[in-house]
Image (spheres, rainbow, N blue to C red):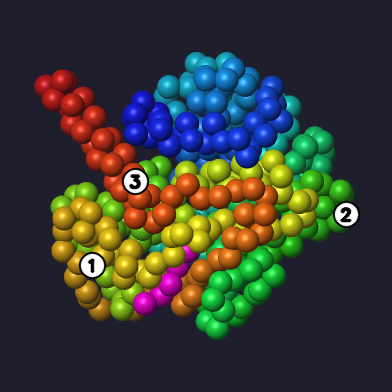
Amino acid sequence: MINNPFYQEELKKIINNSNIEWKKFDNKTILITGSTGMIGSFLVDTIMLRNKFFNSNITVVANALNIDSIEHRFNEYINDKNFEILIQNVIDPLNTKYSINYIIHAASNAYPELFDKDPVGTMMGNFIGLNNILDFSVRNNVERVLYVSSGEIYGKIDDMESIIENNYGYVDILKSRSCYPMSKRASETLAISYNKQYNLNVVIVRPCHIFGPTATSKDNRISSLFVKMGLNGENIVLKSKGTQKRSYCYITDCICALLTILDKGKCAEAYNISNPNSIVTIAELAQTISKKTNVKLLFDIPSKNEEKNFNSMENAVLNSDKLIELGWNPLYDFETAMDNNIKILKNERVKKWKIYWEKL
């Protein structure tokens, strides 16, 4: 994807962002867990392009579960002196020969389907995984850890226009679907406890509903699923009234925010990542994607199995004032961001077809 010209334009907007003090990261080493996921892979591409254009000499240590996913996603960087690979599961104690300055911990089971199939693995991955990262950071004098949590930690709050960082609602702890938000909540407390007890420099981000072209093929969150269906020429099927209101944030704005918080965020605090110009209902999301991909929008009744995986938050609009105070401002509104997302993905499909025909 790095050779996609439309995708590169997105990356350039971040590496040229004057609000991020990029020189702070020059000649540093950054470990990125979950490096092949939506957020992690976009982040890796951003840093590697920054190296190319500005000779920043930032070393990326890309962590993933297996070498195949790394080689497939980052084939262009395999022989780059600033790209290193760390293959291991984060639930195992972190073991690396590299001297790490910063850690961005983005590894997590974030797919609703897996919350139902593997709630224990979801909880262990979130909590034990972060504990291993924090323990390593204390022992190896890591300068700062940024933990990628989730807007789902807020639970059910229906009477607020937008949710600020110290508002917490109801999560039904006796539902296995709660494995994700509850383990994220506990992990945040763990991070703050490491700061209190060991003086570890840690900061937390809570992304809202992020979308973009780096979503993986197994991503079954509706923003990714609806785009895939539309680009495949399939009618989009909405299995609810779609009245739930959500903060959506394009991946470019998300990565700008994340790097701003890594740079300027206050230690031991949490920041929402959301775009005030990108608040829509699920029905509006589906309508927008169906229109832009020229497919129909259909409504259907969900099965009981599907209902189990639904997010119970009726209102998931996150307030971004605290983030904006750091100097971050969104580049896109929802419509423009979705246009860019679809344009990049269409270009990727054209490239794959060209490669296919050239091989015949």
Residue positioned 51% across, 32% down in the render: 46
Q: Nearer the viewer, mark 1 or mark 3?
A: 3
Name the quarter where the N terminus is drawn.
Answer: top left
Give the amino acid type for the residue marked by disc 2 in the picture: Gln
Which label is found at residue 341? 3
The answer to whether residue 296 is left or right of residue 35 is left
Q: Is residue 277 above or below residue 177?
A: above
Q: Is residue 34 above or below residue 245?
A: above
- Report if the CB atoms under discs 1 and 2 are less than 8 Å apart: no
Give the position of the C terminus as an image quadrant: top left
User: Could you tell me the amino acid type at mark 1?
Assistant: Val
Magenta stretch bounds: 243-247
| Secondary structure state at the residue bearing disc 1 | strand
Q: Which residue is mark 2?
A: 197
Mark 1 to mark 3 CA distance (whole Å):
20 Å
Residue corresponding to mark 1? 237
Residue type at mark 3?
Asn
Q: Residues within 10 Å of mark 1 (few under 14, many from 20)?
A: some
